């Protein structure tokens, strides 16, 4: 990893001190994307293996409450649905990690900004689920 | 629609293309995925949008992981603009009933065409290029940028598209951010905006699992390839490619508006 970047040959500019927080954010994004992709791929592969691809794309989502019991029965649709849900939660987990990272750096302004983003996103999700 | 292995392969290919272009240009690719799914796969429009939202999140997470790691994403600027974008998106959905979608589409097309032209013009002045690393520049006109990001959020809340195609020009033209930092920061932001809507589509049953999963897998692989190309490609080529995609989007928006007027 580079310690500084040279924008102008005479003026090296230090990378901000938030490298650890950025590292944590990139880890959440990377593993969220990789693991959810692997789960979705496994679900699709299992569906193909069982020859259940002839099924219609129309479906009713399994309620997250019941997802676990369907997963235990290794139902392809339940596996794919948990991959999708993990994918959808990844950006939200990334905001939470940003809040923690900025808090550890004692950067109050950005703690508040990130909390604001988190609050609005959670608010719009709760509106949606009620409606 | 019945799914065969040929369908799965075509969906993964579509995802690969959209994910690659999205990672390269900082856009979600909804305007590529939605029309292809509805026209060629017969997916209903709401399910096509739900699928596209999943793909935007896959593009954003896959690409941003790499861009944040390499300090191309400006995380602080991204979080700040995200605040304006999410507020805009929520207010957009509240006033949706009061606004003409057709009129807004045409206005959006005019903005895209103008921004595309302005970007090509700016790319011809190499003096404007700073190092493509977060923090190697000074953000200009932030208050205007916040207002514009709020507008971008509102448009994407109303039309379901347009997050990236507005955010990148706002950062590049208005805030004076290097192009690659603008696209990487846009990539970082679009996942959050998409996630907020994606849960709505999920709870309504509008994310067709067997369509979304293979497409999203393709997107992830495409985004990984796109990030490699983006880091090596000259900014000027990316700017020209971006402008071409913007002109295509503008054409699509006018077409949608025309269809909307014809059908009402």
Image (spheres, coloured by chain):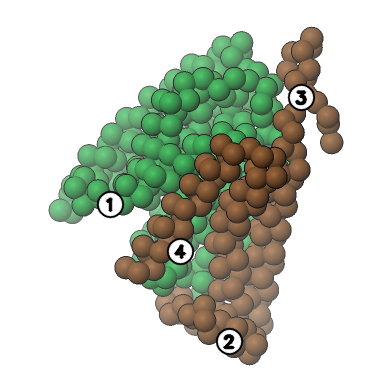
Are labels 4 and 1 assigned to the same chain?
yes
Residue B148 drawn above or below residue B15: above
Are labels 4 and 2 assigned to the same chain?
no
Are labels 3 and 1 assigned to the same chain?
no
Q: CA distance from mark 4 to mark 2?
A: 21 Å
Residue B238 at x, y percent in the picture: 59, 30
Residue A112 drawn above or below residue A82: above
Secondary structure at badge 1 equals helix
Return the residue at label 1.
B94
**Residue B41 can be seen in this image:** no
Chain drawn brown in the picture: A
Colour assignment, chain B: green
Q: Chain of mark 3?
A: A
Relative to residue B108, is residue B174 drawn left or right? right
Residue A14, labelled with which disc? Answer: 3
Q: Residues within 10 Å of mark 2 (few under 14, many from 20)?
A: some
Secondary structure at badge 3 equals strand
Asked which quadrant contains residue A67, the reply is bottom right
Q: CA distance from mark 3 to mark 4?
A: 39 Å
Return the residue at label 2.
A70
The residue at 29%/40% (across/down) is B105
Return the residue at label 4.
B199
Q: CA distance from mark 1 to mark 2?
A: 37 Å
Q: Residues within 10 Å of mark 1 (few under 14, many from 20)?
A: few
Query: Disc 4 vs disc 1: which is toward the camera?
Result: 1
In which quadrant will I find the N terminus of chain B? bottom left
Q: CA distance from mark 3 to mark 2?
A: 51 Å
Query: Disc 3 vs disc 4: which is toward the camera?
Result: 3
């Amino acid at each position: 990893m580079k310690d500084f970047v040279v924008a102008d040959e005479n003026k090296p500019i230090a990378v901000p001190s938030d490298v650890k927080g950025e590292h944590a954010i990139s880890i959440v994004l990377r593993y969220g994307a990789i693991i959810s992709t692997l789960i979705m791929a496994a679900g699709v592969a299992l569906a193909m293996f069982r020859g259940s691809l002839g099924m219609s794309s129309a479906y009713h989502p399994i309620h997250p409450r019941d997802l676990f019991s369907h997963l235990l029965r290794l139902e392809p649709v339940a596996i794919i649905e948990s991959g999708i849900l993990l994918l959808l939660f990844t950006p939200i987990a990334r905001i939470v990690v940003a809040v923690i990272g900025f808090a550890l750096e004692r950067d109050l302004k950005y703690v508040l900004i990130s909390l604001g983003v988190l609050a609005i996103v959670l608010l719009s999700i709760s509106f949606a689920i009620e409606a | 629609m019945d799914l065969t292995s040929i369908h799965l392969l075509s969906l993964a290919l579509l995802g690969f293309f959209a994910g690659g272009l999205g990672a390269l240009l900082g856009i979600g690719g909804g305007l590529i995925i939605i029309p292809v799914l509805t026209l060629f796969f017969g997916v209903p429009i709401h399910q096509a949008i739900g699928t596209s939202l999943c793909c935007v999140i896959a593009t954003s997470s896959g690409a941003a992981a790499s861009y944040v790691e390499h300090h191309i994403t400006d995380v602080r600027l991204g979080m700040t603009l995200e605040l304006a974008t999410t507020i805009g998106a929520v207010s957009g959905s509240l006033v949706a009933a009061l606004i003409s979608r057709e009129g807004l589409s045409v206005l959006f097309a005019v903005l895209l065409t103008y921004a595309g032209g302005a970007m090509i013009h700016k790319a011809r002045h190499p003096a404007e290029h700073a190092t493509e690393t977060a923090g190697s520049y000074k953000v200009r006109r932030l208050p205007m940028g916040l207002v514009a990001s709020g507008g971008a959020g509102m448009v994407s809340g109303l039309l379901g598209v347009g997050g990236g195609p507005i955010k990148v020009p706002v950062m590049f033209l208005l805030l004076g951010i290097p192009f690659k930092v603008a696209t990487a920061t846009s990539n970082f932001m679009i996942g959050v905006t998409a996630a907020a809507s994606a849960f709505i589509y999920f709870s309504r049953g509008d994310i067709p699992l067997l369509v979304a999963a293979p497409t999203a897998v393709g997107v992830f692989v495409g985004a990984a390839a796109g990030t490699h190309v983006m880091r090596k490609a000259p900014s000027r080529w990316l700017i020209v490619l971006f402008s071409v995609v913007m002109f295509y989007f503008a054409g699509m928006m006018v077409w949608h508006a025309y269809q909307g007027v014809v059908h009402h």
